[in-house]
Structures are given as C-alpha cells and as structure tokens.
Amino acid sequence: MQPWIRRLRGLPVVVALLVAAGSSSTGGAAARAVPRPTGQEAAHCRALHAELPAALAGLERGTSGPVSEFTADWGDPAVVLRCGIPHPDVLTVGSKSFDRYASAWEIGGIEWFPVRLPDGGVRCIAIHRAAFVEVVVPKEYGGDGTGQTALAELGPLIVKAVPEGYV
C-alpha cells in the first residue's frame, strides 16, 4: 500500500461524505465518457462487464449511453461505472489535485478513493487494481445508503474480474 493513503474502515465515513456532498446530480457527458483501455486493462474491464448485474442497490440497469463494454449505469439519476479510465490526476504525484494525505475507504473488498464532485456527487475510484474502475454516485443517493450499497455490491465483482496491481 502507498504510504500517502490512510485507510479508513467503516461505512459511517461513506455515509457522512455522501450526505455532506453538494446539491445537484452527476449527469452529463463528462461523467459518461467511454474509457479506451487497451491490452490487459481492456481484458479485465470486459471480464468485469460480463459480471455486472441487472440491478444494483435496488436500481435497474440503464441504457442512457453511450453503451460500451467499459461502462454501465443503474437508476435515474444514474450511478455510473467506467472501467479502464486513465490514471486520475488526483492520484498523480505532482498534479495540482494530488493530496498525499487523502484517505481511502475499504468497502466490498476494494479500496476506494473518494472525490467530492462540484455538483454534489461522489466519484469513487477503485485503487490498487490492474485497471482503474470509477463509480460516480449522484448526491441523490447519499443519504439513503444506496451509494455505499452500490460500492459494496460492486466490490466482489471487481475483485473477481480485475486483479490487484498497479496501472
């Protein structure tokens, strides 16, 4: 584990951050851009896509697009999963958004790096995996536990399809 990450265990942290997030949904083209992983990352993402459920945290799978083997969404507003995203600036030493003291959550067997979004949602990035997996949870799901349930349900699927490693 990288020394700049402090592990926080316990779902109350997730709920607190999701509830504290701002005031509007996380829709839009930026949240739904299709990643373009190659090689082994793409293979891991395809394996994950094959495991994804028709319903997540009680939300039905959508087709809000763009439809890809590297993306999926559930509900309206949508919880959006993207697999094979480029290395996030927030995790890149030297970038303006890098925070060496940022904390991570361990949920569902995955270490998630949370990023508050200006529109009120939370962007959670599965770290220490052979491909980066991002899940954007709209602020509408912060107070009712849907966000933490979604991460908990996705965790074992990511563990199965995307092995530990570093991108």
Image: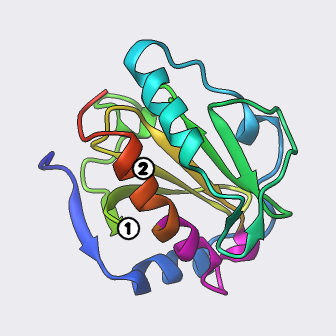
Q: Is residue 70 left or right of residue 164?
A: right
Report the magenta residues as a range.
Answer: 139-151
- Residue 2 sits above or below residue 165 on the image: below
Q: Position of residue 149 (x, y in %)?
A: 55, 75
| Mark 2 vs mark 1, CA separation in Å | 9 Å
- Residue 134 sits above or below residue 35 on the image: below
Q: Quadrant of the C terminus?
A: top left
Q: Is residue 139 left or right of residue 167?
A: right
Q: Is residue 126 left or right of residue 50?
A: left
> Image quarter for residue 6?
bottom left
- Residue 162 sits above or below residue 105 on the image: above
Amino acid found under the numbered disc labelled 2: Ile
Taking the spot 75% from the left edge, 69% from the top edge, the residue there is 59
Which residue carries the number 1 mark?
Answer: 108
Q: Main secondary structure of the magenta part?
A: helix
Asked whether 152 falls inside the magenta stretch, the response is: no
Taking the spot 76% from the left edge, 74% from the top edge, the residue there is 140
First-in-chain label (2 vs 1): 1
Contact (CB < 8 A) between labels 2 and 1?
yes
> Image quarter for residue 142?
bottom right
Amino acid found under the numbered disc labelled 1: Gly
Which residue carries the number 2 mark?
Answer: 158
Q: Position of residue 24 (x, y in %)?
A: 81, 65
Taking the spot 83% from the left edge, 43% from the top edge, the residue there is 28
